[in-house]
Image (tube, grey):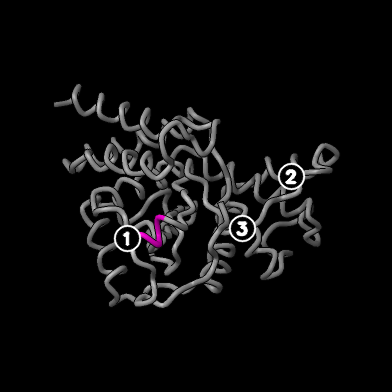
Amino acid sequence: MKPIRSSLPENALPSLPAVLAGVALALSALASPLAYAVDLGGLANSAGLAIKAAALSDAEVIDLADKSCAALDSTHKIAAPDSKYAKRLAAALKPLNMSKYNGKRLDAKVYLVRDVNAFAMDNGCIRVFAGLMDIMNDDEVRAVVGHEIGHVLLGHSKKSMQTAFTLQAARGAAGAVSATAATLSQSDLGDLGQKFIQAQFSQTQETDADDQSYNMLHKEKLSRAGLVTLFQKLAKLEGPGHSMFSSHPSSPDRAQHIQARIDKDN
C-alpha cells in the first residue's frame, strides 16, 4: 500500500471514501508508513550499534524523543489549538484524567495528514493523525491513545526508540555510536522519528497494550466499547481473511479479546 505523506490544510482533508481508498493502517499493530523501507543489510555486523542502543538510558531515550518529535512536527502541519481536530482530541482525552505519563506532561496534537495512525513517545509526545480521527468516534480515539500510552508505560516504546536509533546509526548518522541526539542532524532526527513510527510490536506486546488501554478506561469508568469497535472497523478496512501483519494478532481476535473482558467485568 503506497503511503501518503503530504500534509493537508484542514479543509482539504479527503472525504471518508477517499480516506478509505488510500488508508495506511497504523496504531502500532497497524504499522504506520510515514517513511520508506529500511535496508537492514549489514546489521549483522553492527553489534556495537546494538550494544549502544540497548544501553541508552531513560534520559537519553527521552532526549531522542524530544528532538525526533520536534523534527516530525517541523515537517507536518499541526492542527491549530482552535481547530475542530485539536478541540475534539482535547475533549476526547480529558476524561482519562491523565495530565502526565511516564513522569512527562502530555503533549497531544493532531497531524493534518490522511494516514490512519497515532503514536506516543516516552517524553509525553502524542500525535494523532486526522485520517484516524475522520473514521473513529471519540471512544475509539481515546482507546487508540490509551493503547499507544500503554506501549510507553510497558517499556515497548523505549525499545522501539532503541531499535530506531540502531537503524539510524547503521545508516551512517555521524557519531551516533558514541553519542545520541547531540550528534544527530535535523534530517537524522526526522528519519529517527519516522523509524520509531514504523516500529512493529509482538503479538504479546500488542495484546498487553490493548489491555493497558482497557485498564485505563475501566479505572475512569469510561466506555471500553471503543476498543472493540475500533478493531471491528479496522477488520473491515483490512478485508476478509486479510491480516496486514502476520506477526500481530488479527483485528477480529483483538476485538473478541476485549469483548470477553467487558463481558467478564460487567
1 displayed left or right of 54: left
Q: Position of residue 100 (x, y in %)?
A: 35, 54
Which of the two discs, 1 and 3, sits closer to the camera?
1
Going by the picture, which residue comes out furthest to the top? Answer: 264
Q: Is residue 253 magenta?
A: no
Q: Residue at x 32, y 60 (%)?
A: 134
Which residue reaches farthest left?
Answer: 266
Residue labelled with disc 3: 35
Q: Determine which residue is flagged by label 1.
A: 134
Q: Could you say where residue 97 lies in the image, as x and y percent from the top left?
A: 24, 52
Q: Is residue 259 above or below residue 30?
A: above
Query: Is the Cβ of the residue at disc 2 closer than 8 Å to that at disc 3?
Result: no
Mark earlier in primary sequence (2, 3): 3
Residue at coordinates 39% horizontally, 65% vertically from top-left? 109
Which of the two residues, 205 or 34, is positioned nearer the viewer here? 34
The residue at the point 38 percent across, 38 percent down is 235
- What's under tag 3, amino acid-wise? Ala
Q: CA distance from mark 2 to mark 1?
A: 40 Å
Residue 39 versus residue 130 in the image, above or below: above
Q: Which residues are magenta?
A: 16-20
State how far apart marks 2 and 3 are (Cα).
Answer: 24 Å
Badge 3: few (under 14), some or many (20 or more) residues near its Cα, within 10 Å?
Answer: some
Residue 219 or residue 12, whichever sits in front: 12
Q: Nearer the viewer, residue 219 or 245?
A: 245
> Does 19 lie within the magenta span?
yes
Can the viewer see residue 75? yes
Q: Of tags 2 and 1, which is closer to the observer?
A: 1
Quadrant of image for the C terminus: top left
Disc 2 marks which residue?
52
Q: Is the residue marked by circle 1 packed among few (<14), some (14-19), or many (20+) residues within 10 Å?
A: some
